[in-house]
Image: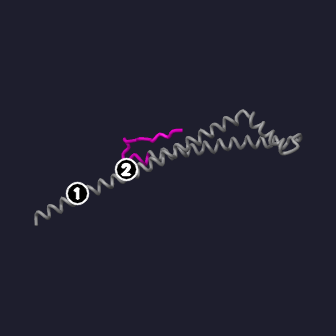
Amino acid sequence: MVMQTPRKPELTINDYPHEIAKLRTAIARLDREVASLEYAIARIDLSIENTIASNRELKNDTQRRAKRGELRGFHPELRTYQEQLTRAREKRTRKEIQLEMLRNAFSVAKLKLRHEIASMVLDRDVDLAMDLALAA
């Protein structure tokens, strides 16, 4: 998987907090989706465990493990939920990376703004000092 670096040169210093909030909201939605899928998978696993526990024909752990694998392999929704869970986790990871990159870009933008302000103040102070020196 190749990670693309998000480029948003059109963002101003005031846009960053909103964009960061949007990404955090997307991550929260993905967290809920992941939790929901994990719960669905756990319900299926519990159902399989109950089926195995109530089957008196299974005499030992080897038979129970084999039956568990068989039931998991043939469950119609389990694979779908597992694939959805994997995709949701990957998407969440990508959003988390984008969030960190956006936070870093915001920090850089703030530093650049501070540098510009400091340069303007320094230039003004130098001009003022020159004016005072010439007046003296």
The residue depicted at 62 percent of the width and 37 percent of the height is 84
- Quadrant where the N terminus sits is top right
Amino acid type of the residue that numbered disc 2 sits on in the rendered structure: Ala
Amino acid type of the residue that numbered disc 1 sits on in the rendered structure: Asp
In x, y percent, where is residue 88?
Answer: 59, 40
Crowd band around label 2 with a 10 angstrom C-alpha radius: few (<14), some (14–19), many (20+): some
| Circle 2 residue | 109
In x, y percent, where is residue 21?
Answer: 47, 47
The residue depicted at 37 percent of the width and 42 percent of the height is 9
- Quadrant where the C terminus sits is bottom left
The residue depicted at 45 percent of the width and 41 percent of the height is 5
Place residue 29 in its image quadrant.
Answer: top right
Locate residue 107 relative to residue 62 in the image: left or right. left
The kind of secondary structure element at disc 1 is helix
In x, y percent, where is residue 99?
Answer: 48, 47
Locate residue 135 relative to residue 3 in the image: left or right. left
The kind of secondary structure element at disc 2 is helix
The residue depicted at 36 percent of the width and 45 percent of the height is 12
Q: How many marks?
A: 2
State whether residue 127 is above or below residue 103: below
Q: Which mark is residue 123?
A: 1
Write the start and end of the magenta stretch as one range. 1-18
